[in-house]
Amino acid sequence: MLQWRRVMIDHLGLIIKDPNKIIPFYEACLAPLGIKKVQDQREWRAALFMIPGTRGFLWIGAGATDQPQRLTTYFHLAFIAPDEAAVRAFHKAGLAAGGTDNGTPGFRRPNCFAAFVLDPEGNNIEADWRTV
C-alpha cells in the first residue's frame, strides 16, 4: 500500500445539497478504500470520514438548516486505493449506492489503475491504485 510520510492537507470539507443521499453514498463507496464514517454531525447535516488511526479527515455536509444556502459547485476528488481489487470494489459500491459510471475500472496510464463514479449530485469521484 502506498503510504505518505507527510500530507499537505489536514482536512477537506465538501459542501453538498442533499446529505440524506450523499452521506450514505460516500459511506458505501469509500468503505472498500478503508475510509470510514467516524462521526455524524447532525446539527450541521454532516459527517466526518477518515482512515482509522490517521489524522486527516473529510467533512461532508450541507450546513445547519438556519444557515443561508451555500454555493455549491462540482468537484473532482480522487482517493488512494491499496490495490486493483479495492478500485473495483469502490466502483461497484458507488454504483450500488446511487452513483453513475464515469469510467469503468482499468488502466489509465501504464502504472495507474482507476475507476470513476459520479455521486448523486454529479461530482466526479475517483479511486486509483498506482503500481509504482
Image (cartoon, rainbow, N blue to C red):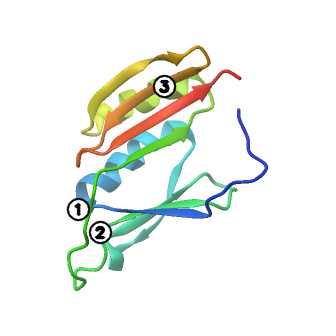
Q: Give the CA separation, mark 3 to mark 1.
A: 27 Å
Which structural element holds mark 3? strand
Which structural element holds mark 2? loop
Q: Indicate left or right for 101 with 48 as reference.
A: left
Answer yes or no: do the residues labelled 3 and 2 have beta carbons within 8 Å?
Answer: no
Image coords of residue 8 (percent x, y): 66, 57
Q: Give the CA separation, mark 2 to mark 1.
A: 6 Å
Location of mark 2 (residue): 62
In the rendered structure, which amino acid carries the disc numbered 3?
Ala
Image coords of residue 88 (percent x, y): 46, 23
Location of residue 103 with respect to 55 vertically, above or below: above
Answer yes or no: do the residues labelled 3 and 1 have beta carbons within 8 Å?
Answer: no
In the rendered structure, which amino acid carries the disc numbered 1?
Lys
User: Residue placed at 24% from the left, 39% from the top?
Assistant: 98
Q: Give the CA separation, mark 3 to mark 2.
A: 28 Å
Q: Give the mark nearer the N terminus: 3 vs 1.
A: 1
Total numbered labels: 3
Image coords of residue 81 (percent x, y): 57, 33
Image coords of residue 6 (percent x, y): 75, 53
Location of residue 122 with respect to 91 vertically, above or below: below
Q: Indicate left or right for 15 with 65 as reference.
A: right
Give the label on residue 87, or none. none
Tell which of 57 and 107 is nearer to you. 107
Nearer to us: label 3 or label 2: 3
Q: Give the mark nearer the N terminus: 2 vs 1.
A: 1
**Residue density around tag 1, few if under 14, some if 14–19, many if 20 or more, within 10 Å:** some
User: Residue placed at 68% from the left, 56% from the top?
Assistant: 54
Location of mark 3 (residue): 114
Location of mark 1 (residue): 17
Q: Give the mark nearer the N terminus: 3 vs 2.
A: 2
